[in-house]
Image (cartoon, rainbow, N blue to C red):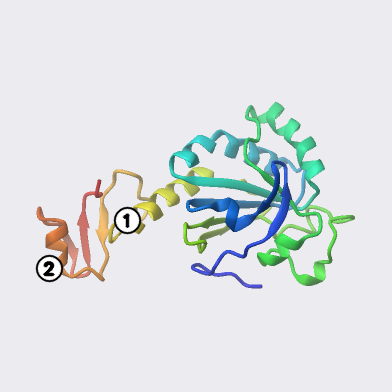
Amino acid sequence: MTLRINDMAPDFEAQTTQGPIRFHEWLGNGWGVLFSHPKDFTPVCTTELGYMAGLAGEFEKRNCKIIGLSVDAVGDHSKWAADIERTQGHAVNYPMIGDSDLKVAQLYGMLPAEAGDSCAGRTAADNATVRTVFVIGPDKKIKLMLVYPMTTGRNFDEVLRVLDSMQLTAKHQVATPVNWKPGGDVIIVPAVSDDDARKKYPDGWKQVLPYMRVVPQPK
């Protein structure tokens, strides 16, 4: 299964470290981040899960839930959590999906159907493609996908930055330029006519190019 931006995020039922969930129901009416891992007790993922636990409050401020997935059983996740807290300084405070039957990894196109239906005997290298971040909007559609190699730790500060951008641009008819950070100037999208832009921005804008109008970030 190939997923693309603006596809509906596949729904599923799963066991997690915080009990059973139905994914869409668990998401509710807010945003969500699903980030996946090839196997428990792997070093790079250990750092990622700990860092994400430290950021949990920042995601909560943005009405965004976070949930992890690893291709192992829930019982293994719970044992791994002790290593994460001891070495990273943060207890994993969000649910971790157990995917020992590979169903969610296959549903989201991270493993092929021929991978089978069990994590038994599979190594992290066998599951190397299960290293994706999905950001899902309140409409349950996929807004962002980031895929990383096993040897490169993910930048979750960047995920927060992109979430800020997506929430801003969903509310206002603007886009954010390269390396934008909250508080920086934004771009009026081309679909907004000059006449409509004048109503929104009576103080005007900076005309960089015929198709690029820059204004301060709306509040």
**Residue 148 visible from this viewpoint:** no
Residue 12: horizontal and vertical position, in percent?
67, 61
Q: Residues within 10 Å of mark 1 (few under 14, many from 20)?
A: few
Determine whether, in the image, residue 165 is placed left or right of residue 99.
left
Q: Give me the residue at 23% from left, 64% from top.
A: 212
Residue type at mark 2? Asp
Label 2: which secondary element: helix
Determine whether, in the image, residue 72 is placed left or right of residue 52.
right
**Residue 102 visible from this viewpoint:** yes
Q: Give me the residue at 57% from left, 64% from top.
A: 9
Residue 38 vs 85, above or below: the answer is below
Label 1: which secondary element: helix
Query: Residue beneath label 2, please?
Result: 195
Q: Give me the residue at 79% from left, 36% from top.
A: 79
Q: Residues within 10 Å of mark 2 (few under 14, many from 20)?
A: few
198 or 155, which lies in front?
Answer: 198
Counting residues from the start of the chain, the first of labels 2 and 1 encountered is 1
Q: Are marks 2 and 1 in contact (CB under 8 Å)?
A: no
Which residue ends up furthest to the left in the rendered image? 203
Eye-nearest disc, 2 or 1: 1
Residue 16 vs 24, above or below: the answer is above
Residue 93: horizontal and vertical position, in percent?
63, 35
Residue 100: horizontal and vertical position, in percent?
81, 54
User: How many numbered markers are drawn?
Assistant: 2
Q: Give me the residue at 48% from left, 58% from top.
A: 137
Residue 7: horizontal and vertical position, in percent?
53, 69
Query: Residue beneath label 1, please?
Result: 171
Which residue ends up furthest to the right in the rendered image? 121
- In space, the residues marked 2 and 1 are separated at their CA atoms by 19 Å
